[in-house]
Image: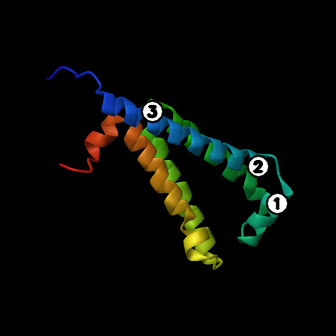
Amino acid sequence: MTAPTAPTAQSRTAARIGWALTALIAIFLVFDAVSKLMNVQQVKDATVDLGLRDDMIPVIGVVLLVCLALYLVPRTAFLGAVLLTGYLGGAVLTNWRVDKPLFSTVLFAVYFGIVVWGALYLRDPRVRQVMPLVR
């Protein structure tokens, strides 16, 4: 077994950038979840337009907050990223099913998922070990 090495300046910078991206992700998702939990009329209208029942909105908000909480805790961040990926996949399908614009609306969740994983990749060296960009 090898001794752990001290983090390099490059890995500290990557971690800082990863946490900054994580903070932006968290702000966006907390706003989204809270607007669902507060029963905002625009959210209700948009959800019904997507073909979902309005009684589903608070459940979706709670699921999002749980996924986000898992993502923000370093010990469960990988699980949180996997669960957020599933959540975002549901958003892709829901928007695609009602013929929303592909690149601006349907794929927004894909773009967002890439940022979620990119932030985790930058902030967690274990993820970089499991998924190296270059070998």
- Who's the residue at 49% across and 43% down the image? 80
What kind of residue is marked 3?
A: Arg
53 with respect to 7 (left or right): right
Is residue 75 positioned above or below 133 on the image? Answer: above
Label at residue 42:
1
Q: Are marks 1 and 3 in contact (CB under 8 Å)?
A: no
Q: Secondary structure at mark 1?
A: helix
Residue 13 on image: x %, y %: 39, 33
Q: Secondary structure at mark 2?
A: helix
Which residue is disc 3 drawn over?
Answer: 16
Label at residue 123:
none
Neighbourhood count class around disc 2 (C-alpha, 10 Å): few under 14, some 14–19, many 20 upward: some
Neighbourhood count class around disc 3 (C-alpha, 10 Å): few under 14, some 14–19, many 20 upward: some
- Who's the residue at 74% across and 55% down the image? 57
Q: Are marks 3 and 2 in contact (CB under 8 Å)?
A: no
Q: Secondary structure at mark 3?
A: helix
Q: Of the two numbered discs 3 and 2 on the same chain, state the one appearing first in sequence.
A: 3
82 with respect to 67 (left or right): left
Q: Quadrant of residue 67?
A: top right
Q: Of the two numbered discs 2 and 1 on the same chain, state the one appearing first in sequence.
A: 2
The residue nearer to you, when weighing 41 against 115, is: 115
Nearest-to-viewer mark from 1 and 3? 3
| Residue at the right extreme of this rendering | 41
The residue nearer to you, when weighing 4 against 77, is: 4
Residue 109 on image: x %, y %: 55, 61
Q: Quadrant of residue 77?
A: top left
122 with respect to 97 (left or right): left
Which residue is disc 2 drawn over?
Answer: 35
